[in-house]
Image (tube, helix red, strand yellow):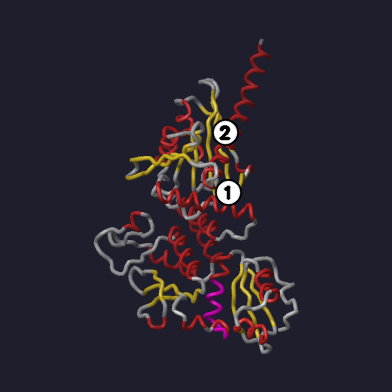
Amino acid sequence: MQKNSKPYQKLPNQPGVYLFKDKSGLVLYVGKALNLKKRVRNYFDKQPKEKRIENLLKEAQKIDFIEVSSEIEALLLEARLIKQHWPKYNVRLKDDKRYLYVGITKEKYPKIALIRQPEREEKLLAWYGPFPTAASLKEILRLLRRVFPYRTCRQLTDKSCLYYHLNLCPGMCLRETTDYRQTIKKIMMFLDGRINPLVSNLKKEMKKAAGEQKYEQAGQIKRQIQMIEILLAGHGKDQDEEKSQRQLDELRKLLVQYSGIEPMVIQRLEAYDVANLGENLIVGSMVVFTEGEPDKSQYRQFKLTWSGGDPGGIKQILSRRLTHQEWLFPQVILVDGGKTQVAAAFEALREKNLFKTIPVLGLAKKEERIFIPKVIKEKIVSWKTFKCQSSSLVHQLLQQARDEAHRFAQRYYKKLHRKVIFSSIKQK
């Protein structure tokens, strides 16, 4: 293929897999890309640093591509195509022990493990790969385990492990788990790239469970669908989006370290505030930040009854909000205030049995202190309190969300207050 040719011009600016082929149509190389056009263009706009790439460009006569909707789907498809074609210029994957496969064992309760040479493994139910990017594969499995908890231990014992207590393993060591095989089938569909059929099946299961009035089961399936959609969210971002992603990553690390809850990813953050000047008029606000940016179409206002000031108002808002299962649940909840407000929000989450999956924290105005509760056995047992610097990415995000919730609550309060004053003047 000529160095000055531009075969990438017809490629889309979308995630996908590209295939270099020779004149007979033989696949020479398979690669994945978040942006197909930009990735393939790099082969022609830059001088190859490796002899392998230089030889590939000389031999290749055609570039095909398969467009997908997310980077994860591209990674899974790349692994399948490499396994199918064993392209000449992917040859290093055959022998390089850094590259991994996912193996699923043939047992009563199959375990999922990373393996190097699947052809030498005994009693494998299925295996997937090779995956050229080990870090990406490990991240996918970490996130996937939060959607579909699975076993990783070598031997079953009669004791529970850490993963069971983190809701990352069904706990077949402690009890008979009848639906685990179905979980494994869903994981296999995901790793095989059949994600749309998987989501379609889950929606049918959710509808059936709701029709049979099994609302807790339907809610669990709905959360699985939502987490898959979050997992598949694209990662191509400009500078502002990259900053937002760094903020969310830092916030996630903070919560893992101090709250004991590990959000899969943080896509949706909800912030709450209460505005009142006594018992006669009290209102609340919910603002939503999607991927670190305000999402005003999701904002909500609440007219409340007096129930003990700001803490009571916070609990009342959260209790009402959490009944709306048609609204996507957040991965993080932020309240305007300190320990009493956070404790009130936690109580609302505890009553809905969501305290293990949705962390809550507070940001107080006066000293700009963050309050993160540590929860053990349905109780707040300690607090992590610290003052952030203005340069902190986490503080910038939380401050923006807190101030937006405060602004939105005050706006609604003033609107209703004007109506009350106007009504009283009119009656006179």
Report the front residue among 100 and 413: 100
Question: Would you say 40 lies left or right of 126 here?
Answer: right
Question: Would you say 170 lies left or right of 79 here?
Answer: left
Is 110 magenta? The answer is: no
Q: Residue furthest left?
A: 158
Give the amino acid type for the residue marked by disc 1 in the picture.
Gly
Q: Position of residue 347 (x, y in %)?
A: 40, 37
Q: Which quarter of the figure has residue 86?
A: bottom right
Closer to the N terminus: mark 2 or mark 1?
1
Which residue lies at the image location 66% right of the left edge and 10% below the top edge? 428
Q: Is residue 274 above or below residue 202?
A: above
Residue at which label 2 appears: 406
Q: Secondary structure at mark 2?
A: helix
Q: Position of residue 267 (x, y in %)?
A: 54, 51
Distance from the alpha carbon under mark 2 to that under mark 1: 17 Å
Q: Position of residue 115 (x, y in %)?
A: 40, 75
**Circle 1 crowding by C-alpha within 10 Å: few under 14, some 14–19, many from 20:** many
Report the front residue among 227 and 372: 372
Of the 4 image quadrants, the one containing the N terminus is bottom right
Residue at which label 1 appears: 292
Report the front residue among 307 and 53: 53
Q: Position of residue 242 (x, y in %)?
A: 60, 55
Give the amino acid type for the residue marked by disc 2 in the picture.
His
Is 81 magenta? The answer is: yes
Can residue 192 be seen here?
A: yes
Which residue lies at the image location 52% right of the left edge and 28% below the top edge? 304
Which stretch did the figure color magenta? Answer: 76-88
Q: Secondary structure at mark 1?
A: loop
Q: Is residue 146 above or below residue 410?
A: below
Residue 253's tag is: none
Can residue 213 be seen here?
A: no
